[in-house]
Amino acid sequence: MKPIFRLSVIILIVCFAMSLSAQDDPADTCTIDLINAIRDLKAAQAEAQQDNLYSAVQLMESVQAQIADILAGCENLEIDLSQTGTAEDADFGYTFTVNYPEGWAFSDYAGLLSIANSEALLARVYEDELTLEDGQIVIIGLPLVGVTADALGLAEDATAADAVELISGIFFGGHDTETNFNDPENVELNGKSATIMSGSATVNGITAYGSTIAVQVDGGFAVFTARYNGDFDAEIRAIVGSAELSTTE
């Protein structure tokens, strides 16, 4: 078999493996059935081995079309946020809620919420030298409203970008911290205006990927910092977009 053609077949096999990872998704609009595609892929391999490259390419195009149809039906899948966490602060008069995935862990500390994708990690979330293994994430959220916003110096006419800059300076502005963040990105999360800034940060000599996010809620902003080792962009955006705030003042 010609090397270039063999490489194309390998690439398709890798695509299959990636697509198979979504087979257990319960969304009604996403149906993944690769039986025909795998059959055509095997047939393409057999044709290639017989140097029938034209037939092999036609079969590969059929496989690509089938995968494209599957991906199109699954492109609007949403992260399943079946759990709800509530943080309350009676002194400042607010209730702060977010949704998060099943199997993750949540805690409330004086109105400050923490989320991690395991109970063991959640117990370590405030360690000074927290290290994250592959596939781990921690998120800390805080309402930036009323007295809290005033105390931190956030202007009344501040934008989400202003809130991100403020919180980033607090969390990552120390002399022992080095950051390499992208430019702030203005987005819409679950119908709410938000700003995200992501990149890497080295704190106390420990480097991790992180994001600072501010999302518009009633009365001000909810701000989040996330540290992670892996690809959690979709989960972070979904969790932050679910934030709701109610106040009693």
Image (cartoon, helix red, strand yellow):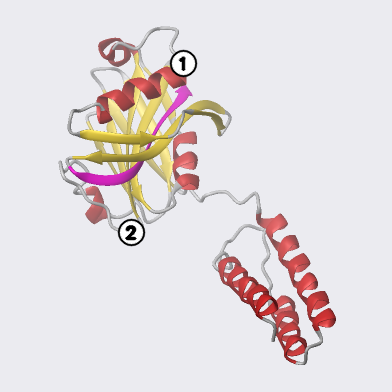
Q: Which of 152 and 202 is in front in this view?
A: 202
Q: In which quadrant of the rendered view does residue 31 lie?
A: bottom right
Pointer 2 residue: 134
Q: Where is residue 127 in the image (x, y as percent from the top left)?
A: 16, 43
Q: Give the range drawn in magenta.
A: 205-218
Circle 2 SS class: loop
Q: Mostly what secondary structure, the magenta segment?
A: strand
Which quadrant, please, contains the N terminus? bottom right
Q: Is residue 68 left or right of residue 122?
A: right
Q: Is residue 229 visible?
A: yes
Q: Is residue 58 left or right of residue 239?
A: right
Q: Are marks 1 and 2 in contact (CB under 8 Å)?
A: no
Q: Decide if residue 134 is on the left or right side of residue 74.
A: left
Q: Residue 241 at x, y = what percent?
A: 49, 35
Residue 193 image position (x, y, % from top left): 53, 25
Q: In which quarter of the image is the C terminus?
A: top left
Above-or-below relation of 18 to 184? below
Residue drawn at 48 percent across, 27 percent down: 195
Look at the image and tell me whether residue 246 can be seen.
Answer: no
Above/below status of 9 relative to 199: below
Residue positioned 72% across, 55% down in the render: 72
The residue sitting at the top extreme is 156
Q: Which residue lies furthest to the bottom in this view?
A: 50
Q: Number of marks in the image?
A: 2
Q: Give the mark, 1 or 2, whose residue is nearer the N terminus.
A: 2
Q: What element carries label 1?
A: loop
With 243 as the anchor, is 125 left or right in this view? left
Dot 2 crowding, Cα within 10 Å, few <14, some 14–19, many 20+:
few
Q: In this view, does 10 lie above or below 49?
A: above
Which amino acid, mark 2? Asp
Residue highlighted by disc 1: 159
